[in-house]
Amino acid sequence: MTEAVTSVWGGERVGVRLGPSGTFGSMSDSNPDALFGHAAARLNRFGLAYLHLIEPRIDGSKLRADGLPPVAAHQLRRVFKGPIIAAGGFERDSAEAIVESGDADLVAFGRHFAANPDLVERLRRNLTLSPHDRDTFYGGDERGYTDYPCHDDLAQVA
Ligand SMILES: Cc1cc2nc3c(=O)[nH]c(=O)nc-3n(C[C@H](O)[C@H](O)[C@H](O)COP(=O)(O)O)c2cc1C
């Protein structure tokens, strides 16, 4: 798959996302370290834009253990030669920490971004984040999709 896509677009325009600890759809592997270490090493030859990793902080919708060490990026950083994006249960402080540690180049936010359309500015200014409402995920209308307000301190320019 990666070979087919990069042959059309070039590796620098393609990113790959892996969830080494994912259990969605009953997925699992008896030796994820070996499997994903091998996969990350094999991806090196494509010169990808990035490898995006879901950290084992998150299990479906639940935080497994806030503050678990960032195993996925920490391990695969030693194998994969391009930029690494980490995702999964990050907060402002833990996001800064993983970048400072050198285990990831970037951090992606999912649910915080859904509930905070001005997330970047909130993180920059260390403002409070709005909580997300899981019941409105995958909802089919604007609720939980485009109706979360911006922070009161961030004036909207009309
Ligand atoms: C409503 C919703 C839809 C998602 N859809 C996808 C998806 O299609 N593909 C994917 O790789 N991850 C998907 N995710 C997972 C997120 O990309 C992210 O990995 C996850 O929410 C953990 O990061 P977070 O703790 O910052 O939310 C989805 C998450 C949510 C909440």
Image (tube, rainbow, N blue to C red):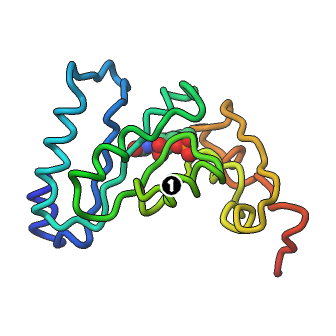
- Whether residue 48 sits left or right of residue 131 in the image: it is left
- Whether residue 117 sits left or right of residue 20 in the image: it is right
- Quick one: which residue is furthest to the right in this view? 152
Q: Residue at x 9, y 67 (%)?
A: 7
- Whether residue 9 sits left or right of residue 91 in the image: it is left
Residue 17 image point, x, y percent:
32, 49
Residue 68 image point, x, y percent:
52, 33
Q: Which residue is mark 1?
A: 108
Query: Front-most of 37 and 18?
Result: 37
Q: Quadrant of residue 151?
A: bottom right
Number of numbered discs on residues: 1
Residue 61 image point, x, y percent:
55, 29
Q: Residue at x 76, y 52 (%)?
A: 148
Q: Residue at x 46, y 61 (%)?
A: 106
Query: Front-most of 105 and 46?
Result: 105
- Quick one: which residue is furthest to the bottom in this view? 158
- Considering only vertical position in the picture, is 158 above or below 109? below
- Considering only vertical position in the picture, is 60 above or below 19? above
Query: Front-most of 3 and 158?
Result: 3
Q: Residues within 10 Å of mark 1 (few under 14, many from 20)?
A: some
**Amino acid type, mark 1:** Ala
- Considering only vertical position in the picture, is 121 above or below 27? below
